[in-house]
Amino acid sequence: MSNDSNQKIRTYKDAVALITGGASGIGAAIAKDLVRRGASVILADRQLEAAQTLATSLGAKAEAVALDVRDADQFASVVEGTKARHGRIDYFFNNAGIGIGGPVQDHSLEDWRYTIDVNILGVVYGVHAVLPILREQGFGHIINTASMAGQIPCPGLTAYATTKHAVVGLSRSLRAESAQAGVQVSAFCPGVIQTEILNKGGTFGRSMGWADAEPDAEQLAKTKPMDADAFAREALDRVAANDEIIILPRRWYMMARFDKLFPRLFSSFIANRFASEASRLERRAASATAGK
Protein backbone atom coordinates (compact mmCIF):
# COMPACT_ATOMS: atom_id res chain seq x y z
CA MET A 1 0.00 0.00 0.00
CA SER A 2 1.15 3.53 -0.76
CA ASN A 3 2.68 5.41 2.17
CA ASP A 4 1.42 8.75 0.86
CA SER A 5 -1.63 9.51 2.99
CA ASN A 6 -2.66 12.25 0.53
CA GLN A 7 -3.20 9.71 -2.21
CA LYS A 8 -6.87 8.86 -2.66
CA ILE A 9 -9.36 8.23 -5.40
CA ARG A 10 -10.46 11.29 -7.39
CA THR A 11 -14.14 11.82 -8.07
CA TYR A 12 -13.97 12.60 -10.93
CA LYS A 13 -11.82 15.64 -11.69
CA ASP A 14 -8.26 14.66 -12.70
CA ALA A 15 -9.06 10.97 -12.24
CA VAL A 16 -7.64 8.31 -14.56
CA ALA A 17 -10.14 5.75 -15.87
CA LEU A 18 -9.42 2.67 -17.97
CA ILE A 19 -12.50 1.42 -19.83
CA THR A 20 -12.67 -1.89 -21.72
CA GLY A 21 -15.19 -2.03 -24.51
CA GLY A 22 -14.77 1.73 -24.58
CA ALA A 23 -15.44 2.25 -28.28
CA SER A 24 -19.20 1.86 -28.17
CA GLY A 25 -22.30 1.30 -26.08
CA ILE A 26 -22.12 1.70 -22.32
CA GLY A 27 -18.32 2.01 -22.42
CA ALA A 28 -18.43 4.96 -24.81
CA ALA A 29 -21.20 6.66 -22.83
CA ILE A 30 -19.21 6.28 -19.60
CA ALA A 31 -16.13 7.71 -21.32
CA LYS A 32 -17.99 10.77 -22.57
CA ASP A 33 -19.47 11.55 -19.18
CA LEU A 34 -16.17 11.03 -17.37
CA VAL A 35 -14.42 13.49 -19.68
CA ARG A 36 -17.25 15.96 -19.07
CA ARG A 37 -16.56 15.58 -15.33
CA GLY A 38 -12.84 16.24 -15.80
CA ALA A 39 -11.35 12.74 -15.91
CA SER A 40 -8.84 11.29 -18.35
CA VAL A 41 -10.01 8.12 -20.09
CA ILE A 42 -8.25 5.25 -21.81
CA LEU A 43 -10.55 3.49 -24.29
CA ALA A 44 -9.44 -0.13 -24.63
CA ASP A 45 -11.21 -2.05 -27.38
CA ARG A 46 -10.61 -4.55 -30.17
CA GLN A 47 -12.39 -2.03 -32.39
CA LEU A 48 -9.31 0.19 -32.32
CA GLU A 49 -10.34 2.47 -35.18
CA ALA A 50 -13.71 3.20 -33.55
CA ALA A 51 -11.98 3.80 -30.21
CA GLN A 52 -9.54 6.21 -31.86
CA THR A 53 -12.38 8.10 -33.52
CA LEU A 54 -14.18 8.50 -30.20
CA ALA A 55 -10.97 9.50 -28.41
CA THR A 56 -10.30 12.18 -31.01
CA SER A 57 -13.81 13.58 -30.55
CA LEU A 58 -13.30 13.73 -26.77
CA GLY A 59 -10.08 15.71 -26.99
CA ALA A 60 -6.82 15.67 -25.08
CA LYS A 61 -8.22 13.79 -22.08
CA ALA A 62 -8.93 10.64 -24.10
CA GLU A 63 -6.72 8.03 -25.74
CA ALA A 64 -7.35 4.69 -27.43
CA VAL A 65 -5.51 1.38 -27.13
CA ALA A 66 -6.08 -2.00 -28.75
CA LEU A 67 -7.31 -4.75 -26.45
CA ASP A 68 -8.91 -8.13 -26.88
CA VAL A 69 -9.93 -9.04 -23.32
CA ARG A 70 -9.45 -12.74 -24.10
CA ASP A 71 -5.68 -12.12 -24.22
CA ALA A 72 -4.37 -11.99 -20.63
CA ASP A 73 -0.89 -10.85 -21.65
CA GLN A 74 -2.25 -8.00 -23.78
CA PHE A 75 -4.55 -7.03 -20.91
CA ALA A 76 -1.61 -6.88 -18.48
CA SER A 77 0.35 -4.75 -20.97
CA VAL A 78 -2.51 -2.25 -21.34
CA VAL A 79 -2.92 -1.94 -17.57
CA GLU A 80 0.82 -1.56 -16.97
CA GLY A 81 1.06 0.99 -19.79
CA THR A 82 -1.78 3.01 -18.31
CA LYS A 83 -0.09 3.14 -14.92
CA ALA A 84 3.27 4.02 -16.48
CA ARG A 85 1.85 6.91 -18.53
CA HIS A 86 -0.51 8.36 -15.93
CA GLY A 87 1.07 7.35 -12.63
CA ARG A 88 -2.19 5.98 -11.21
CA ILE A 89 -5.48 4.27 -12.03
CA ASP A 90 -8.51 5.61 -10.18
CA TYR A 91 -11.25 3.69 -11.98
CA PHE A 92 -11.24 0.46 -13.93
CA PHE A 93 -14.44 -0.13 -15.88
CA ASN A 94 -14.25 -3.85 -16.68
CA ASN A 95 -16.97 -3.41 -19.26
CA ALA A 96 -16.28 -5.39 -22.44
CA GLY A 97 -18.76 -8.17 -23.14
CA ILE A 98 -20.79 -9.89 -25.81
CA GLY A 99 -24.39 -11.03 -26.05
CA ILE A 100 -25.44 -14.48 -27.18
CA GLY A 101 -29.04 -15.55 -27.52
CA GLY A 102 -31.35 -18.25 -28.76
CA PRO A 103 -32.45 -21.73 -27.69
CA VAL A 104 -29.79 -23.29 -25.48
CA GLN A 105 -30.10 -26.60 -27.36
CA ASP A 106 -28.80 -24.75 -30.44
CA HIS A 107 -25.64 -23.56 -28.66
CA SER A 108 -22.47 -25.35 -29.66
CA LEU A 109 -19.69 -25.90 -27.16
CA GLU A 110 -17.76 -23.25 -29.09
CA ASP A 111 -20.60 -20.78 -28.43
CA TRP A 112 -20.30 -21.53 -24.72
CA ARG A 113 -16.50 -21.22 -24.76
CA TYR A 114 -16.63 -17.93 -26.63
CA THR A 115 -19.14 -16.42 -24.21
CA ILE A 116 -17.16 -17.60 -21.18
CA ASP A 117 -13.85 -16.42 -22.66
CA VAL A 118 -15.15 -12.87 -23.16
CA ASN A 119 -17.68 -12.40 -20.35
CA ILE A 120 -16.00 -14.31 -17.52
CA LEU A 121 -12.32 -14.81 -18.30
CA GLY A 122 -12.12 -11.34 -19.85
CA VAL A 123 -13.32 -9.90 -16.55
CA VAL A 124 -11.00 -12.15 -14.54
CA TYR A 125 -7.99 -11.11 -16.63
CA GLY A 126 -8.82 -7.48 -15.97
CA VAL A 127 -9.13 -7.96 -12.23
CA HIS A 128 -5.91 -9.99 -12.17
CA ALA A 129 -4.00 -7.24 -13.99
CA VAL A 130 -5.32 -4.17 -12.20
CA LEU A 131 -5.90 -5.31 -8.62
CA PRO A 132 -2.21 -5.38 -7.56
CA ILE A 133 -1.82 -1.78 -8.77
CA LEU A 134 -4.87 -0.57 -6.87
CA ARG A 135 -3.76 -2.38 -3.71
CA GLU A 136 -0.30 -0.87 -4.01
CA GLN A 137 -1.83 2.60 -4.42
CA GLY A 138 -4.19 2.01 -1.51
CA PHE A 139 -7.14 3.29 -3.54
CA GLY A 140 -9.11 2.61 -6.70
CA HIS A 141 -12.49 1.38 -7.88
CA ILE A 142 -13.22 -1.65 -10.07
CA ILE A 143 -16.59 -1.57 -11.81
CA ASN A 144 -17.55 -4.83 -13.52
CA THR A 145 -20.36 -4.69 -16.08
CA ALA A 146 -22.79 -7.52 -15.37
CA SER A 147 -26.48 -7.32 -16.31
CA MET A 148 -29.97 -7.86 -14.98
CA ALA A 149 -29.32 -11.28 -16.52
CA GLY A 150 -26.93 -11.68 -13.59
CA GLN A 151 -29.76 -11.01 -11.13
CA ILE A 152 -32.74 -12.96 -12.47
CA PRO A 153 -33.42 -16.00 -14.69
CA CYS A 154 -33.15 -15.15 -18.39
CA PRO A 155 -34.29 -18.05 -20.60
CA GLY A 156 -33.29 -17.49 -24.19
CA LEU A 157 -30.10 -15.91 -22.89
CA THR A 158 -28.92 -18.86 -20.82
CA ALA A 159 -25.21 -18.73 -21.71
CA TYR A 160 -25.14 -14.95 -21.30
CA ALA A 161 -26.99 -15.15 -17.97
CA THR A 162 -24.55 -17.79 -16.75
CA THR A 163 -21.62 -15.45 -17.33
CA LYS A 164 -23.34 -12.41 -15.84
CA HIS A 165 -24.29 -14.27 -12.65
CA ALA A 166 -20.60 -15.15 -12.38
CA VAL A 167 -19.61 -11.49 -12.72
CA VAL A 168 -22.01 -10.50 -9.92
CA GLY A 169 -20.59 -13.21 -7.66
CA LEU A 170 -17.03 -12.16 -8.46
CA SER A 171 -17.82 -8.50 -7.77
CA ARG A 172 -19.55 -9.03 -4.44
CA SER A 173 -16.87 -11.40 -3.17
CA LEU A 174 -14.00 -9.21 -4.34
CA ARG A 175 -15.64 -6.15 -2.77
CA ALA A 176 -15.66 -7.83 0.64
CA GLU A 177 -12.12 -9.11 0.23
CA SER A 178 -10.63 -5.81 -0.96
CA ALA A 179 -12.37 -3.29 1.28
CA GLN A 180 -9.61 -3.18 3.90
CA ALA A 181 -7.04 -2.50 1.17
CA GLY A 182 -8.89 0.65 0.10
CA VAL A 183 -10.12 -0.90 -3.15
CA GLN A 184 -13.79 -0.46 -3.97
CA VAL A 185 -15.72 -2.86 -6.20
CA SER A 186 -19.13 -2.42 -7.82
CA ALA A 187 -21.17 -4.17 -10.49
CA PHE A 188 -23.35 -2.58 -13.13
CA CYS A 189 -26.57 -4.56 -13.66
CA PRO A 190 -28.27 -2.73 -16.52
CA GLY A 191 -31.74 -3.64 -17.67
CA VAL A 192 -32.48 -2.81 -21.29
CA ILE A 193 -30.10 -0.08 -22.51
CA GLN A 194 -30.21 1.36 -26.03
CA THR A 195 -26.91 -0.03 -27.37
CA GLU A 196 -25.70 -2.25 -30.19
CA ILE A 197 -26.03 -5.36 -28.02
CA LEU A 198 -29.80 -5.27 -28.61
CA ASN A 199 -29.13 -6.13 -32.25
CA LYS A 200 -28.22 -9.83 -32.17
CA GLY A 201 -25.75 -9.41 -29.33
CA GLY A 202 -23.75 -6.53 -30.81
CA THR A 203 -20.80 -6.42 -33.20
CA PHE A 204 -19.16 -9.54 -31.75
CA GLY A 205 -22.26 -11.26 -30.41
CA ARG A 206 -24.05 -14.35 -31.68
CA SER A 207 -27.66 -15.36 -32.12
CA MET A 208 -29.33 -18.54 -33.28
CA GLY A 209 -32.73 -20.02 -33.96
CA TRP A 210 -35.63 -17.61 -33.44
CA ALA A 211 -33.23 -15.08 -31.85
CA ASP A 212 -31.51 -14.59 -35.22
CA ALA A 213 -34.42 -12.62 -36.65
CA GLU A 214 -34.15 -8.88 -37.20
CA PRO A 215 -35.02 -6.96 -34.02
CA ASP A 216 -38.74 -6.26 -33.57
CA ALA A 217 -38.87 -2.50 -33.03
CA GLU A 218 -42.41 -2.58 -31.65
CA GLN A 219 -41.63 -5.26 -29.06
CA LEU A 220 -38.35 -3.59 -28.14
CA ALA A 221 -40.12 -0.29 -27.55
CA LYS A 222 -42.33 -1.99 -24.95
CA THR A 223 -39.25 -2.66 -22.81
CA LYS A 224 -38.56 1.12 -22.64
CA PRO A 225 -34.81 0.97 -23.31
CA MET A 226 -32.79 3.52 -21.36
CA ASP A 227 -30.60 5.91 -23.33
CA ALA A 228 -26.93 4.97 -22.85
CA ASP A 229 -25.91 8.54 -22.00
CA ALA A 230 -28.63 8.77 -19.36
CA PHE A 231 -27.43 5.44 -17.97
CA ALA A 232 -23.86 6.74 -17.77
CA ARG A 233 -24.83 9.91 -15.90
CA GLU A 234 -26.82 8.09 -13.25
CA ALA A 235 -24.44 5.12 -13.02
CA LEU A 236 -21.43 7.36 -12.40
CA ASP A 237 -23.28 9.10 -9.59
CA ARG A 238 -23.88 5.66 -8.06
CA VAL A 239 -20.21 4.70 -8.52
CA ALA A 240 -19.20 7.90 -6.71
CA ALA A 241 -21.45 6.81 -3.83
CA ASN A 242 -19.67 3.41 -3.85
CA ASP A 243 -22.89 1.46 -4.37
CA GLU A 244 -22.31 -2.28 -4.58
CA ILE A 245 -24.90 -3.36 -7.17
CA ILE A 246 -26.06 -0.66 -9.58
CA ILE A 247 -29.37 -1.56 -11.22
CA LEU A 248 -30.65 0.81 -13.90
CA PRO A 249 -33.24 1.75 -15.03
CA ARG A 250 -34.51 1.80 -11.47
CA ARG A 251 -37.77 -0.01 -12.29
CA TRP A 252 -35.72 -3.19 -12.74
CA TYR A 253 -34.82 -3.10 -9.07
CA MET A 254 -38.36 -4.18 -8.18
CA MET A 255 -38.07 -7.18 -10.47
CA ALA A 256 -34.86 -8.22 -8.71
CA ARG A 257 -36.56 -7.81 -5.32
CA PHE A 258 -39.53 -9.91 -6.46
CA ASP A 259 -37.13 -12.68 -7.50
CA LYS A 260 -35.29 -12.59 -4.15
CA LEU A 261 -38.47 -12.60 -2.05
CA PHE A 262 -40.54 -15.07 -4.09
CA PRO A 263 -38.12 -17.12 -6.21
CA ARG A 264 -40.49 -19.98 -7.02
CA LEU A 265 -43.30 -17.65 -8.06
CA PHE A 266 -40.92 -15.49 -10.07
CA SER A 267 -39.44 -18.50 -11.88
CA SER A 268 -42.94 -19.65 -12.82
CA PHE A 269 -43.76 -16.17 -14.11
CA ILE A 270 -40.57 -16.07 -16.19
CA ALA A 271 -41.16 -19.56 -17.60
CA ASN A 272 -44.69 -18.70 -18.73
CA ARG A 273 -43.60 -15.41 -20.21
CA PHE A 274 -40.72 -17.08 -22.05
CA ALA A 275 -42.96 -19.80 -23.50
CA SER A 276 -45.27 -17.15 -24.92
CA GLU A 277 -42.46 -15.03 -26.33
CA ALA A 278 -40.56 -17.99 -27.82
CA SER A 279 -43.75 -19.14 -29.56
CA ARG A 280 -44.28 -15.65 -30.98
CA LEU A 281 -40.70 -15.49 -32.26
CA GLU A 282 -40.93 -18.95 -33.81
CA ARG A 283 -44.09 -17.93 -35.68
CA ARG A 284 -42.41 -14.71 -36.82
CA ALA A 285 -39.35 -16.60 -38.06
CA ALA A 286 -41.53 -19.16 -39.89
CA SER A 287 -43.54 -16.35 -41.52
CA ALA A 288 -40.38 -14.59 -42.64
CA THR A 289 -39.03 -17.83 -44.16
CA ALA A 290 -42.30 -18.53 -45.97
CA GLY A 291 -42.28 -15.03 -47.44
CA LYS A 292 -38.92 -15.47 -49.15
Image (tube, rainbow, N blue to C red):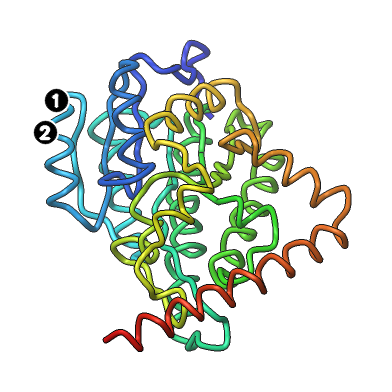
Residue 91, picture quadrant: top left
**In screen coordinates, is 269 left or right of 231?**
right
- Percent across and percent down for residue 222 are 52, 48
Mark 2 surroundings within 10 Å by alpha-carbon count, few (fewer than 14), some (14 through 19), many (20 or more): some
What is the spatial separation of the Cα atoms under label 2 and label 1, in whole angstroms?
A: 5 Å
Q: Which of 288 and 257 is in front in this view?
A: 288
- Disc number placed over residue 271 in the picture, else none: none
> What residue is drawn where x is 36% and y is 80%?
288
**Residue visible at 40% across and 57% down?**
198
- Camera-nearest residue between 102 and 121: 102
Where's the C terminus, which quadrant?
bottom left
- Residue 56 numbered tag: 2
Residue type highlighted by circle 2? Thr
Residue designated by label 1: 59
Q: Where is residue 28 in the image (x, y as percent from the top left)?
A: 30, 39
Compared with 129, 284 (above or below) is: below
What residue type is disc 1 on?
Answer: Gly
User: Residue placed at 38% from the left, 57% from the top?
Assistant: 197
Question: Residues at badges 2 and 1 in contact (C-beta under 8 Å)?
Answer: yes
Callout 1 secondary element: loop
Numbered disc 2: secondary structure: helix
x, y percent for residue 248: 57, 36
Q: Nearer the viewer, residue 51 or 194?
A: 194
**Residue 262 image position (x, y, % from top left):** 88, 53
Tell me the residue at 12%/51% (across/down).
Answer: 49
Disc 1: CA contacts within 10 A as few (<14), some (14-19) or many (>=20): few
Q: Quadrant of the N terminus?
A: top right
Is 242 rendered above or below residue 117?
above
Instruction: Give the camera-side residue of 134 and 110.
Output: 110
